[in-house]
Each structure stands twice: as C-alpha cells, then as structure tokens.
C-alpha cells in the first residue's frame, strides 16, 4: 500500500529519527520527497530530501530548513 503525506518539518524530523535511529544531520528542504518503507515494526529510509523533481524549475537551493531544532 502506498500512502502520500504532506507534513511539517518537525514531523519529518521525528519520522527520520524513528527510521534511522538518529536525527537527520542535513536540512529538510521545502517540497522535497522523502520515502520510508515500513514493514511490520521495521522502518527504513529509502530516500530523503530528493529535489530531482524540481530540476529545471525556479527552485531556491537555499530553501528554508526549519528552526535549529529541526535540522
């Protein structure tokens, strides 16, 4: 089953932490695609912070990355 969610950076930070076992050390970029695989109790980061779908557009690479606590 595939599920799409659009969430705040604070939620993304907690999802990443749950899947990877530590906080994300980069910036959560606006409009990025983040993919997790959840199988039973196992969580895995498949893709994080992808902006390839924005290539060729007017994407600002300095996109807001949340507050200091969210990466």
Image: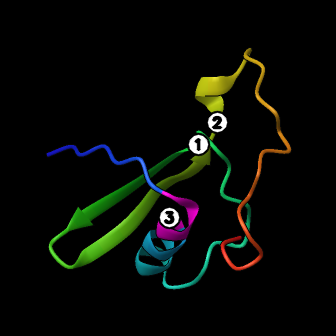
The residue located at (59%, 39%) in the rendering is 31
**Disc 3 versus disc 2: distance between alpha carbons?**
15 Å
Check contact, mark 1 vs mark 2: CB within 8 A: yes
Residue at the far right: name it.
Answer: 62
Residue at the far bottom: name it.
Answer: 21
**Disc 1 versus disc 3: distance between alpha carbons?**
11 Å
Q: Mark 1 or mark 3, which has the lower sequence index?
A: 3
Nearer to the camera, 59 or 41: 59
Check contact, mark 1 vs mark 3: CB within 8 A: no
> Where residue 3 sits: x, y (%)?
24, 46
> Where residue 55 sits: x, y (%)?
70, 21
> Where residue 2 sits: x, y (%)?
21, 43
Q: Mark 3 or mark 2, which has the lower sequence index?
A: 3
The residue located at (63%, 30%) in the rendering is 52
Q: For the magenta stretch, what is the residue range?
A: 8-12
**Disc 1 versus disc 2: distance between alpha carbons?**
5 Å
- Tag 1, which secondary structure? loop
Residue at which label 3 appears: 12
Task: Examine the image and state in which quarter residue 48 appears.
Answer: bottom right
7 displayed left or right of 27: left
Nearer to the camera, 36 or 31: 31
Residue at which label 1 appears: 32
Q: Mark 1 or mark 2, which has the lower sequence index?
A: 1
Question: Is residue 7 depicted above or below 44 in this figure?
Answer: above
17 displayed left or right of 65: left
Magenta stretch: dominant SS?
helix
Residue at which label 2 appears: 51
- Tag 3, which secondary structure? helix
- Tag 2, which secondary structure? loop
């Amino acid at each position: 089953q595939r599920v799409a969610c659009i969430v705040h950076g604070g939620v993304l930070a907690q999802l990443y932490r749950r899947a990877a076992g530590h906080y994300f050390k980069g910036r959560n970029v606006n409009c990025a695609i983040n993919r997790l695989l959840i199988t039973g109790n196992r969580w895995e980061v498949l893709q994080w912070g992808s902006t390839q779908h924005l290539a060729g557009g007017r994407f600002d690479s300095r996109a807001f990355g949340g507050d200091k606590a969210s990466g």
